[in-house]
Image (cartoon, rainbow, N blue to C red):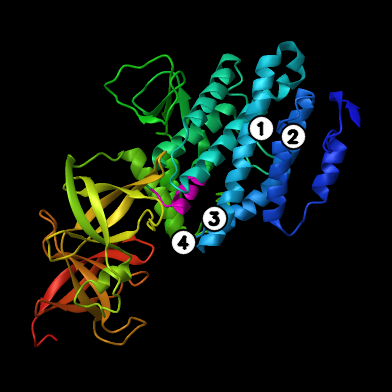
Amino acid sequence: MFSGIFGKKSDHPMADLKSAQSILDDLPKNDAHKSLMEITEWIESVAQRSEFKLDHQFAVLRLLDETAQSCLRKLAREYFVPHELQKFQENRLWLTLGNFFRHSTDAYHLVFERYCNEGKSAGALKPNLPLLVARAIHALAGRMKYACAHYDLIESENWQKLAQLYLHAEQQQYAAVPLQLYAATAGESSVQSEFGCLLGWYGCWAGTLDPLRMHLIERILMHCRAGISVSAEQSPDSLFSFDLNQPAAPLRVNVEANGQPSRRYIGMKALQPQLEGLISRLGKGGVPDELNLGGGYDAELVGSAARHLLGYLSEPPTRRSARRGIKVKLNVVCSFANVVERTDVGLNFSDEAPAQWEIEDISASGFRTLLPVQGANIRIGGLLGIRPEGVSHWGVAVVRRLLRDKDNQLHVGAQMLSSQIAGVAVSQSGGGGGGFEDGQPALWLNAKPGEISGEAQLMLKADSFSAHRSLQTQLHGKSYLLVPQRLQEKGQDYDLASFRIIEREAADE
């Protein structure tokens, strides 16, 4: 039995740091998944040992957490990838990573509560209090991140823990104390910095991004964390607010509302020049070496995440048109290929019946519905083909928002791109192939009122758009030259692009 440093005798295998280190040295070096699962079990076990002295309980948790970092980095690289994972692999990674952060959050919070309750006897931990609370908030951010990767509702107890931790740091005046969060982490952090990063990330994400871009925005914010401010006073630069007395998800600041003493305001104005500089460098084709994204990612992909963040800071999104509560039944198909199958240009190999959705409310620019999670194979940025009951033609929409509620129902928000589409076959102008299939199916989106005359939006299969290649097609008996203008959106299985259209005479052809 081990005693002395833990006061009471304990037969726990990690009852001193030497035996703990020995156990960790025996973890499988080439199996990050198994290692992380074992570390998670040890964290859960150590957190429950009330006979351990508080400062040494924290020391063992620190050691376990530090050892886990290399496994976390490897598994996160496998999870946040540009391509779709097999369902089994995705669930396996998500459960392992999510469980680690859930148990880490609980363990650090238990140590924190022991410190608050034990008074003078907990004094040996006081020098490490800033690190304890900063790591607790960091673990809480990881817990929320993997919940958000499945569009789960963040439980209220998580916001309550965040408020409790930060309020204590403010009251005891260690919120801004600089520290190194982990041995391998570049740059300084603090309790305040971790708090601001978490709220800024959640506020800018809020169920509107796919998991990969959600991850990239988190990493960009961590890199630019010095530009995030936390203040008790509302200012013109305040973007989000968080109430320490009534903790819940951060809210967009209402400039006309009166400030409250319990609210903390998150400002991100100083990030704008950093983001503009980053986007400029990414536009030249390379990801800066100092930007740690947790893996290797294409510059264009990182740029899309940075542009989303900059756009949110420059002009936070607002609802463009009022919603009306209305019951509408929609026939729905998912994916570019399935939408093409519903048009004249499709080969009509599929005999799968469309899904039936009942719309809860609708506006001029989109709609919202509620689906059972089971069987809802949709994702942020996913393309939907839609046809209202009693209407003969199909339109297209894109999923923009997902959120799972406490009843395991999925709230889906979609943006309407066009209420009517036509299937066309496009080929490269002038022939020559150039890797572009002759007669490749595409979707021609009928123009909305107010859109630029002489331009058309087309959806092509993924990675087909080129800014340097004109296309040709026929629609309603007329031939058109399609001169590329810009790529508007790159989806999982489609490119949405705008083209200048030139009607061609028979002689031109």
Please identify, in this view, whether the residue under mark 4 or under mark 2 is nearer the observer.
2
Please identify, in this view, whether the residue under mark 4 or under mark 3 is nearer the observer.
3
Quadrant where the N terminus is found in the figure = top right
> What amino acid type should be assigned to the residue bearing mark 3?
Asn
Residue sitting farthest toward the right: 1
Residue at left 58%, top 18%? 168
| Quadrant in which residue 125 is drawn | top right
Residue position marked by numbered label 1 in the rendering = 107
Mark 3 residue element = helix
- The percent position of residue 467, horizontal first and vertical second, equals 31, 69
Locate residue 108 relative to residue 88 in the image: left or right. right
Going from N to C along the chain, the mark reached first, 4 or 2, is 2
- For the record, the magenta segment spans 209-220
Going from N to C along the chain, the mark reached first, 1 or 2, is 2
> What amino acid type should be assigned to the residue bearing mark 1?
Ala
Question: Dots 4 and 3: beta carbons under 8 Å?
Answer: no
Separation of marks 4 and 2 at Cα, in angstroms: 47 Å
> What amino acid type should be assigned to the residue bearing mark 4?
Gly
Going from N to C along the chain, the mark reached first, 2 or 3, is 2
- The percent position of residue 309, horizontal first and vertical second, equals 39, 44
> What amino acid type should be assigned to the residue bearing mark 2?
Val
Question: Dots 1 and 2: beta carbons under 8 Å?
Answer: yes
- The percent position of residue 136, horizontal first and vertical second, equals 61, 31
Residue at left 18%, top 50%? 328
| Towards the viewer: 440 or 328 | 328
- The percent position of residue 448, horizontal first and vertical second, equals 13, 57
Looking at the rendered structure, which numbered label has been put on residue 91?
A: 3
Mark 2 residue element = helix
Looking at the rendered structure, which numbered label has been put on residue 285?
A: 4
Question: Dots 1 and 4: beta carbons under 8 Å?
Answer: no
Residue position marked by numbered label 2 in the rendering = 46
